[in-house]
Amino acid sequence: MKEKILELIEQYDTIIVHRHVRPDPDAYGSQCGLVEILKESYPNKKVYAVGQDEPTLEYMRKLDKIEDDVYQGALVIVCDTANTDRVCDKRYTLGDKLIKIDHHPNEDPYGDLLWVDTTASSCSEMIYELYLFGKDRGLKLCDEAARLLFAGIVGDTGRFLFPSTTEKTFTYAGELIHYEFSRTELFDRMYELDPNIIKLNGYILQNFEFQPNGAAFIKLTKELLEEYNAKPSEASLLVGSLGDVKGIKAWVFFIEEKDQIRVRLRSKGPVINGVARKFNGGGHPLASGATIYSWDEVEDVMKELNTVLQ
């Protein structure tokens, strides 16, 4: 599949790369890392990273703004996006050919070419693997691409703590740090939080509900977020904090937005993406997301989670 992807890349003069909505570092890392590789390798091609900007990730890269007609005759690549509903910028269908590169379970096999590897720690790891496969035929990895891919790998492995981290992950990360970028500066940008978000985390740690079978959850209403001057995307950055609590097996953040409630599920072992699928979502076995539309549904989500834990 990597061979077929490279063949398509070589054929097209315009390449447009998308990723998923509400992006995380791996979404930006894989999308923008691929763009930087292609720009470095094929200076005569027009290569773009598109989608809605995420202010909390602007330290990684600014996205490109393009008109609809740029898609005419273009190759479109979607990174780190399991299903079409989550593709950011619905113009991804306007191109000539479509490639899906992803590490989530392949429940929505869209695209003309699909490369899905659920054993990869991150989509950024896969993009680096694509570079390794193609470096003998012209692919080049610049310092900026290395920085982006390293950030994506770090983000999706929880700084190499998650079970998805493999020997290959460490090998690739070890190779990437030989490039010229500041890991210290990158880590600071990835993990430093504003004082109001730190205080919100304090609220979470004092007010989460812990159930006897190892389930836990916290409800973050719009009013509460306003009290702490926190955006839903900033609250989502704190979802890992309950993982440090002894005895918790799986937990949920319910984060209210304008017209919906985001459900962030995490687990230390039990597979919870089946719960997410029952509530308009999906994701990895131990890290998934879903959507509900009423606080009354919180009980339904927790009932499904408790069934899994039992």
Image (tube, rainbow, N blue to C red):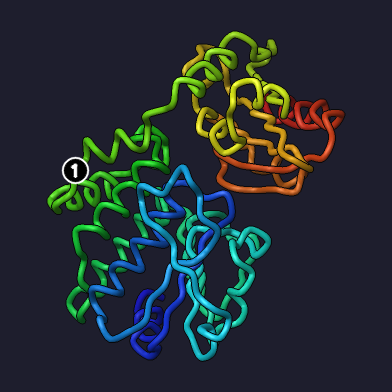
Residue 237 drawn at (x, y percent):
50, 33
Residue 49 drawn at (x, y percent):
43, 67
Q: Identify whether 96 is placed above or below 229.
A: below
Q: In front: 68, or 206?
A: 68
Quadrant of residue 206 in the image? Answer: top right
Residue 208 drawn at (x, y percent):
64, 14
Q: Which residue is mark 1?
A: 182
Q: Identify whether 286 is placed above or below 127.
A: above
Residue name at image x 58 percent, y 81 percent: 68
Q: Identify whether 206 is placed above or below 154.
A: above
Q: Identify whether 274 is placed above or below 202.
A: below
Q: In front: 187, or 271?
A: 187
Quadrant of residue 267 in the image? Answer: top right
Q: Which amino acid is tagged 1?
A: Ser
Residue name at image x 59 percent, y 26 percent: 229
Q: Residue furthest right?
A: 296
Residue 154 drawn at (x, y percent):
34, 42
Which corner quadrant holds the C terminus? top right
Which corner quadrant holds the N terminus? bottom left
Quadrant of residue 214 in the image? Answer: top right
